[in-house]
Image (cartoon, rainbow, N blue to C red):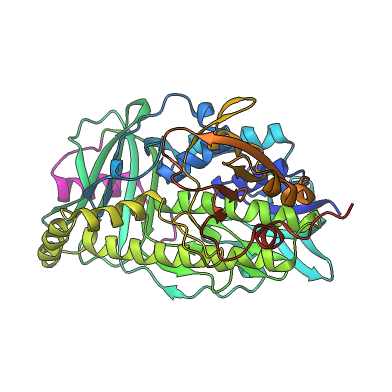
Amino acid sequence: MDAAVIVAGAGPAGLMLAGELRLAGVDVIVLERTAERSGESRGVGLTTRTVEVFDQRGLLSKFGPLETGKFGHFAGLFLDLGVLDSAHEPAKTVPQSHTETVLEKWAFELGADVRRGTEVVGLRQEDGHVEVTARGARGTEELTCEYLVGCDGGRSAVRRLAGFEFPGTPATRELLLADVRGIDVRPRMIGEQVPGGMVMAAKLPGGVTRLIASEHGKAPRPRDEPVSYGELADLWLRLAGDDVSAGECVWLSAFGDAARQAARYRRGRVLLAGDAAHVHLAAGGQGMNTGIQDSVNLGWKLAARVRGHARDELLDSYHDERHPVGERLLVSTRAQGHLILSGPEIVPLRRMLAELTAVPEAARHLAGLVSGLDIRYDVGAGSHPLLGLRVPHWELATAAGPVTTTALLRPARGLLLDLRDNPVLRARAAAWADRIDVVTGTPAGETAGDTTAVLVRPDGHVAWAAPGSHHDLTTALDRWFGPARTP
């Protein structure tokens, strides 16, 4: 085998997956079609849950100073994310290029083999492995791996070559986007309606202004050549009335509102994550963040399977857990697309939705959606409120000193929190010591309530909690971490 896992694509999803696999000691090769990082920033900003995950892996400090705030939005309707239980706030103006730079350096430091200028052009699944044909500067070569993961974007070659179904709806609208220096236009709210279309203008770091514009009644058209800045400047002048033609265009793109999702995220030994698994309108900055979360969910499961700890059912749970999240993402972005891109006929609906967001329960529901904090996986029956949710940021007093649940997740291992100094509990978990860490500690204040113990997966989600889970600890350990180690 050339590597246990080959990842196609060195975007945020692919690099995050590579890092997660390396934390578990799994050999990984990342194949990236482009020879150099482009500097393009399709995604701007990190959701609250992504900020949490980066902190759990010790990555947050690598980003440098971040502009954060407690407010988010749904289709331009502002939401107070401060009502949610998190030690973090979303980061507002982090270019995707910066996120990729941080993740690539992290993956390199952990020992990932990132090969740029190399693309996947063929694959064949065999018993026990995948044969991958790659083409790059060294010519065409055959590589062999146990598993192949397509993180290679909305036009994924892996998805096509492996025969994944990708149902959905085609684009009905086109939007033009440009990052521009040397212009002075006023900020415009997300999805601002103007006669004839929609415009948005936002300040980014480095003196860059992001412009997005879409004209009503203009269906997407096939483009034989890339969109020109002159086309965007003409459209901005028609819709917004500002002449931006003298600006220095840093990056330019045309995109639509197509909504498609892979019917399955796994076919044998080939899996999909990120935009390769789901494409949608870039509304609310959800796509890149969802792709990162795909990889955090998949990484530890794939590593456990490669290392022989887990049954195949654990790998199947990746689709079972993340496909509904992707489906909900498509519903959310399509709804926002209608609210942002439609004409005057949508104004009454926006006004009604604005009224609903003034209702605390409705506002909290939408805040949970856009922050990524409300994702709950099916980890088994039980009444404990944390089951399936991500573990909160708790401060614990331990014999070794104070520590937080966030810091305890840095190694990307399972974690059993013994909150009542229970030797029987610890003895039951001893047979999984090669896969989970057991920490005995007392939570600060009343943060944990009556909870006596919590089993946390490497992705930070609670797999078992006491009291309240309907099955015992050993059943949960066996399900999520495989059979107990034999003496």
Vertical relation: 32 (above or below) 411: below
Q: How far across and how far down the image is residue 321, in percent?
A: 54, 64
Along the viewing direction, whichever of 435 and 72 lies nearer the viewer: 435
Q: Residue at x 30, y 57 (%)?
A: 365
Q: Residue at x 32, y 35 (%)?
A: 180
- Quarter of the view holding residue 380: bottom right
- Quarter of the view holding residue 317: bottom right
Vertical relation: 181 (above or below) 81: above
Q: How far across and how far down the image is residue 284, in percent?
A: 33, 51
Give yes or no for residue 244 being in the magenta stretch.
Answer: yes
Q: How far across and how far down the image is residue 116, in percent?
A: 67, 43
Give yes or no for residue 170 being in the magenta stretch.
Answer: no
Q: Which residues are magenta?
A: 222-245
Q: How far across and how far down the image is residue 21, in percent?
A: 70, 47
Along the viewing direction, whichever of 149 and 53 lies nearer the viewer: 53
Along the viewing direction, whichever of 256 and 393 lies nearer the viewer: 393
Q: Residue at x 46, y 32 (%)?
A: 444
User: Along the horizontal axis of the image, is 213 left or right of 370?
Assistant: left
